[in-house]
Amino acid sequence: MDREDDFDRGVKNRRAVLGDSWVDKSLGNANAFNADFQALITRYAWNDIWGRPGLDHTTRRLLVLGMTMGLARWEEFELHCGAAIRSGVPLEKIQETLMQGAIYCGVPAANTAFKITTDLLREHGLLPGPRPLTDGVRVVTHHTFSTPQLKVALQGSGTPVVLGHALGLDLGMWDGLAERLAAGTLGAPREVLRYDQRGHGGSAAPAGPYSMDDLVDDAARLVREWGRGPVTWIGLSMGAMVGQGLAIRHPELVSKLVLANTTSIYPEAAKAGWAQRIATVDSQGMAAVAEMVVERYLHADFRAAEPAATQAIRSRILRNDPAGYAASCAAVAGVDWQDRLGEIGCPTLVISGAGDAGAPPAMGEAIASRIPGARMAIIENASHLSVLETPAEFDALLKAFLAA
C-alpha cells in the first residue's frame, strides 16, 4: 500500500505475533456491534503498544504469558503461548517465564500454565523427552562441605565419571552427555558427577586471580569428598587443563582421562591476549567479550543452524560474575603441564576440533605425543565446544574409549 494508517500498522504486528489465520478470522468475523472494538485494539494495543521500540516482540510475548497467567486468563494465555511456540520463541524462555510465575502468580496458576503449554508442545510435536524424578535417575544437586564451596550435580549409578566444563560455562554444559552416560547409552551405566568450577555458576567465587593449581586442588578435594575415586575424568577446554593437572599431581584419583579441545601450555603471544581479555572484563564486564567467546566456541554453521543453543551459550557467558571469570582467565592463561605430561600413566584420549581456533589440533597432538599410549582424535566438523557441536561423533569416540 502507498499509505498506511495506524490500523494497518497494527494489523502487521498482530499478524507477526498471532499469525495470519487467527487475525483473518478475528477481522473477518467482525460485525456492527464489535467492529469498533476490533479497530480499537488493533490501533492502540497492536500498533501503539506492540509497535513500541523499547521491547522486542519475544520479550513482550513472555510478559503477556506472565500477565495472563497471573490473571488466570487462560483462553488468552493459550492463544499467546501457542503463537509463541509457532513463532520459535525458545522453549527455555517460555519455561523460565512459567517458573517465575510459580513464585509470583502461585503454584496453582503455574500448574495450569504448564499443563496448557505441555499440551501445545505435544500438539506441535515439540514436547521434550522424559526426565523422570525417580530414585537413581533424578539429578541430585548439592554443594561440597569443603571450601570454597563447589556446586555439584550427581546422577546415575555405576563406574564413577567426573565432567569438567569450559571457561565461562557451568555444569549445564554437560546436560546431554551426563544423561547419556548415566542411562548407559555409551555402554554400561555410569555414576556421573558434574560441578561448577570456582568463580562459575553456583560455586563460590573467592578473590582472584586463580592459578591452575587452585583449580586442580578443588578437583582433588571434590573427588575425595565424593569418596568414589579413582574416576574417569572427562574435561573440555579449562576442564581438560584441570584433568591434566589432576592426573599428574593426584594420579591415584584418575583411572581414565579424556582431554577435549585443550592445551597444556600457551605461547607467549597468546598469554598477551589473555591479559587483554582480563583487562577488558575488569573494565567493561562480560558483555564486552561475550560475542567474541561465542564465535570462538561455536562455528558459524552451527550458530546459524542452532540459534537457540547458541543463545543459551551466550546467555550463560553473560551471567558470569566478571570478577570470577577474570580470575579464572588468569588460571587458564598460566596453564603449564607440558613438561610433566609424561608422568600421566592412565589411559588417555585426546580430542580436537579441526576448526578450533582457541585450541587447534596441533595443541592436542602435542599433548597426545607426550602422554604414553595416548590416543588422538580430530573431529572434522567441530570447533571448540565439540561435545555440543558434534555430539554423535564425540559420543562415538567416548564410547569406544570407555569400552577399551
Image (spheres, rainbow, N blue to C red):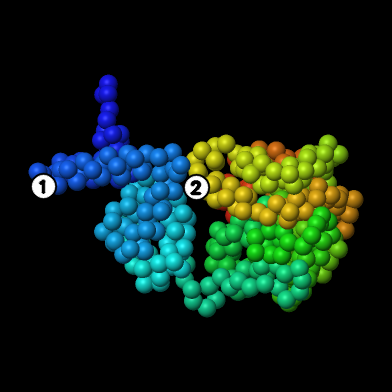
Q: Residue furthest right?
A: 339
Q: Could you tell me which quadrant the C terminus lies in?
A: bottom right
Tell me where residue 114 appears, x and y as whole percent.
38, 64
Q: Residue at x 88, y 58 (%)?
A: 343
Residue beneath disc 1: 33
Q: Could you tell me which quadrant the N terminus lies in?
A: top left
Would you call the spot at circle 2 few (<14 residues within 10 Å), some (14-19), or many (20 or more)?
A: some
Amino acid of disc 2: Ala
Is 60 situated above or below 48? below
Tell me where residue 400 appears, x and y as whole percent.
64, 57
Horizontally, residue 149 falls left or right of residue 89, namely right
Amino acid of disc 1: Phe
Front-lying residue, 267 or 321: 321
Q: Give residue 272's quadrant in the image.
A: top right
Is 238 situated above or below 131? above
Q: Secondary structure at mark 2?
A: helix
Mark found first going from the N terminus, 2 or 1: 1
Q: Secondary structure at mark 1?
A: loop
Q: Are marks 2 and 1 in contact (CB under 8 Å)?
A: no
Q: Residue at x 73, y 44 (%)?
A: 283
- For residue 131, say whether it is visible: yes
Nearer the camera: disc 2 or disc 1:
1
Residue beneath disc 2: 308
- For residue 384, say whether it is visible: no
Q: Residue at x 23, y 43 (%)?
A: 40
Q: Residue at x 26, y 45 (%)?
A: 41
Tell me where residue 350 appears, x and y as whole percent.
73, 51
Tell me where residue 139 appears, x and y as whole percent.
56, 70
Q: Residue furthest left?
A: 32
Front-lying residue, 16 or 245: 16
